[in-house]
């Protein structure tokens, strides 16, 4: 296997096929399945490495933060929600479920050596080794309208001013300023402080030359040079403002001078574009922190808006998709062409069918908009058995040549479900020499061998659904396999083995004709998956899942299971880029990929669900694209020539689970109605997710406007526009 970038995590591959159980429309807490079962079973959780399910992180006035085990009535416990999340991810993978828990971020790139993905966006070639920046300048301001914050960008012009000109100006103002004050590697805020502490004004006058090329290290750069900086106005001088940006190294010797552009009209910044801007300039945050915290540059921008009413920014004009890209330096971090969700939509759009529940949704529940499907499995907190024993308290910190495609490429693909491969021992965190206590945390884990017991309650689960949960507990009877949970997973902490306490099981079948036990349910799930997809157990996804859960394999690759090092002595990132390394797949899987193996199932399911036109994959692809675009109604192709069209301005939409599922549309105050099998009602899936779920509950009649086509003596629903 080729050399790989070191990483404590890897991915289970995701394919475009998603399994949507055919009984999903029948799931309810009230109407029992004939093969359903209710009851409970106890599950033991044993720590194979030190374990910490983090509670509050305490940070005093000095020293590192400390994270202790969460407790319930004073007893260390693993919350039921933690166990549900852990098992749900396994069920999703094992049952070809949706990849649906992801952050739809738009990441950024700033690589001066990447011509295709970065440099060509930021600069243009205007002659032999002569370049001009494409970046524009403007003033960002904020206003509140109708209780909503709106951001505006007012374009302006700018020139570049050499550091020597600024030092000359300071000397003229009789302010002592050393060159190193502006040259040393520091953020922009440091330069502004030096300038302000010298009593110098940012608002000055200066001579702005016409644009022309100047010699620089990469060749010749075309820009407006700014000279003769003065506090006083002059005939040939232009009023403006000095703008400092960060100092990445001593070679940078130019700053900026912003000045007004005549008749410049303010541009309203789209919320999505500002959201991308904020994400790029965020401070590293814990996932549970909801309040946005910007980095130093972002906070500096906010301070300018508070003090001056506006802040200097750099931007690129809208691209082909209409997106405005902004930054706080001329060579700013460029938002990538595609967000995480946009990549997934192109790669495997079924994973975004949020209104269609997969197997994990049916078992654990799911929420779509304001509507929800309540889960039929609940898990009590797993309480520690015996007195707690705490271990050592480690200190940790927060956070051939190959070609790969990133978020700038049309070929970009998401790798899949993120997992932390397990190993037989824990590792120490690499702590950089210059790290301070503010970025460190002391963990207080329970020792290896700590045991917990949790009770799993289930209600009206089909035997194969209960079997899926039991399979996920021990990876289908693979005693060597472990789960990874809690704090410190990248270092090998939190590896647990789960086992069902068979004697605790209490099963109540819905039908007296059905005799069930736990093993029967396990086999029902395995048999169902194999019947649907022969070769399921040895497929690509399950192979990766099991190998990442095998500690013996992780121990052999211990040197790879770490974060890349970046400090004064070592830079694994630069070395990986130089050698063209990528994160290689964890498992050396040599069989047929799930993508290829499931192609037939994909086509058949697509035709059945109305997601793909049979025999016409290209048309189906286009149909899937349309299915994700908000529309008032979706028209069906005509089967025969219509004789007439009716519009029912007030109709009722009723869901009937009988007979495989049917949708009944009836006109108000009349016996007229149209019955459509769910499998054929593509118009139903064009409705908002919340409306679909409300209709599926069968207790709510949904008022809607319906267009009906009458052809060959029969009525057929063409579109439904919800009110």
Image (cartoon, helix red, strand yellow):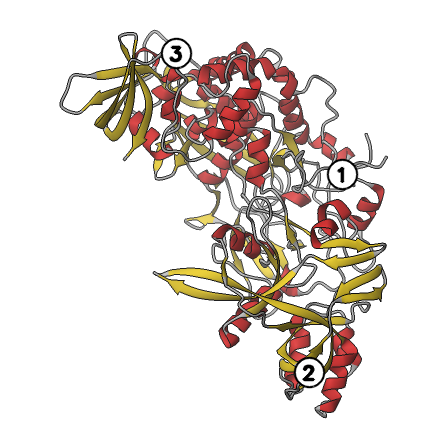
Q: Is residue 228 above or below residue 564?
A: below
Tell me the residue at 68%/27% (across/down).
547
Tell me the residue at 68%/62% (across/down).
330
Question: Alpha carbon of mark 1 to alpha carbon of mark 2: how far?
Answer: 55 Å
Question: Closer to the camera: disc 3 or disc 1?
Answer: 3
Label 3, on which residue? 639
Which label number is shown at residue 582?
A: 1
Q: Which corner quadrant of the image does residue 517 belong to?
A: top left
Expressed as whole percent of the image width and height from the top left, the position of residue 444 reads 59, 52
Question: Alpha carbon of mark 3 to alpha carbon of mark 2: how far?
Answer: 76 Å
Q: Secondary structure at mark 3?
A: loop
Q: Is residue 532 above or below residue 213?
A: above
| Disc 3 residue crowd, few under 14, some 14–19, many 20+, Cα 10 Å | few
Residue contact between numbered discs 1 and 2, judged by CB atoms under 8 Å = no
Label 2, on which residue? 236
Q: Secondary structure at mark 2?
A: loop
Expressed as whole percent of the image width and height from the top left, the position of residue 238 reads 65, 79
The answer to whether 243 appears left or right of 306 in the picture is: right
């Amino acid at each position: 296997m080729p050399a790989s970038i070191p990483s404590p995590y890897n991915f289970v591959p995701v394919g475009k096929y998603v399994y949507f159980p055919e009984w999903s429309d029948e799931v309810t807490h009230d109407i029992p399945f004939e093969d359903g079962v209710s009851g409970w079973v106890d599950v033991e959780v044993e720590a194979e490495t030190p374990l910490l399910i983090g509670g509050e992180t305490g940070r005093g006035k000095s020293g590192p933060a400390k994270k202790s085990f969460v407790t319930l009535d004073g007893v260390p416990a693993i919350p039921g929600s933690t166990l549900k999340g852990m098992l749900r991810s396994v069920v999703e993978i094992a049952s070809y479920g949706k990849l649906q828990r992801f952050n739809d971020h738009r990441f950024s790139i700033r690589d001066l050596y990447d011509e295709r993905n970065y440099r060509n966006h930021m600069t243009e070639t205007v002659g032999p080794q002569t370049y001009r920046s494409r970046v524009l300048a403007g003033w960002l301001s904020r206003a509140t309208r109708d209780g909503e914050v709106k951001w505006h960008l007012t374009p302006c012009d700018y020139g570049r001013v050499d550091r020597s000109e600024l030092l000359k100006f300071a000397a003229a103002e009789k302010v002592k300023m050393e060159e190193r004050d502006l040259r040393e590697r520091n953020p922009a805020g440091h330069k502004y402080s030096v300038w302000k502490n010298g009593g110098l004004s940012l608002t000055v006058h200066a001579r702005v030359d016409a644009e022309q090329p100047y010699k620089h290290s990469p060749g010749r750069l075309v820009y407006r040079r700014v000279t003769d900086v003065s506090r006083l106005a002059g005939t040939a001088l232009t009023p403006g403002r000095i703008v400092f940006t960060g100092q990445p190294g001593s070679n940078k010797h130019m700053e900026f001078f912003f000045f007004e552009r005549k008749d410049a009209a303010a541009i309203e910044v789209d919320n999505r574009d500002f959201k991308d801007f904020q994400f790029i300039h965020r401070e590293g945050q814990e996932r549970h922190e909801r309040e946005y915290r910007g980095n130093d540059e972002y906070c500096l921008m906010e301070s300018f808006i508070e003090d001056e009413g506006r802040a200097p920014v750099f931007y690129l004009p809208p691209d082909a998709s209409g997106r405005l890209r902004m930054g706080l330096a001329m060579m700013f971090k460029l938002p990538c062409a595609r967000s995480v969700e946009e990549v997934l939509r192109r790669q495997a759009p079924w994973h975004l069918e949020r209104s269609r529940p997969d197997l994990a949704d049916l078992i654990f529940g799911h929420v779509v908009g304001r509507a929800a499907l309540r889960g039929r499995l609940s898990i009590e907190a797993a309480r520690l058995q015996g007195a707690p024993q705490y271990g050592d308290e480690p200190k940790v910190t927060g956070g051939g040549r190959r070609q790969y495609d990133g978020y700038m490429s049309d070929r970009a693909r998401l790798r899949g479900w993120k997992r932390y491969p397990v190993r037989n021992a824990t590792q120490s965190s690499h702590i950089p020499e210059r790290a301070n206590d503010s970025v460190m945390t002391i963990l207080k884990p329970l020792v290896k061998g700590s045991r917990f017991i949790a009770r799993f309650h289930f209600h009206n689960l089909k035997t194969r659904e209960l079997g899926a949960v039991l399979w996920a507990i021990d990876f289908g009877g693979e005693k060597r396999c472990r789960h990874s949970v809690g704090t410190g997973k990248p270092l090998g902490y939190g590896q647990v083995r789960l086992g069902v306490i068979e004697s605790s099981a209490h099963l109540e079948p819905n039908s007296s004709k059905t005799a069930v036990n736990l093993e029967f349910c396990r086999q029902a799930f395995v048999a169902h998956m194999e019947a649907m997809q022969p070769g399921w157990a040895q497929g690509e996804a399950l192979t990766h899942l099991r190998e990442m859960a095998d500690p013996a394999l992780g121990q052999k690759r211990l040197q790879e299971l770490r974060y890349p090092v970046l400090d004064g002595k070592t830079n694994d990132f630069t070395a990986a880029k130089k050698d063209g390394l990528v994160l290689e797949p964890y498992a050396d899987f040599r069989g047929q990929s799930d993508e290829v193996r499931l192609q037939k199932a994909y086509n058949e399911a697509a035709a059945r669900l109305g997601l793909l036109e049979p025999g016409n994959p290209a048309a189906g692809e286009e149909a899937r694209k349309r299915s994700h675009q908000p529309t008032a109604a979706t028209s069906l192709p005509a089967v025969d020539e219509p004789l007439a069209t009716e519009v029912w301005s007030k109709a009722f939409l009723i869901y009937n689970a009988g007979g495989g599922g049917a949708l009944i549309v009836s006109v108000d105050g009349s016996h007229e109605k149209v019955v459509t099998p769910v499998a054929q009602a593509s118009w139903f899936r064009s409705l908002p997710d919340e409306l679909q779920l409300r209709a599926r509950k069968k207790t709510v009649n949904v008022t809607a406007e319906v267009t009906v086509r009458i052809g060959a003596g029969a009525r057929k629903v063409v579109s439904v526009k919800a009110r």
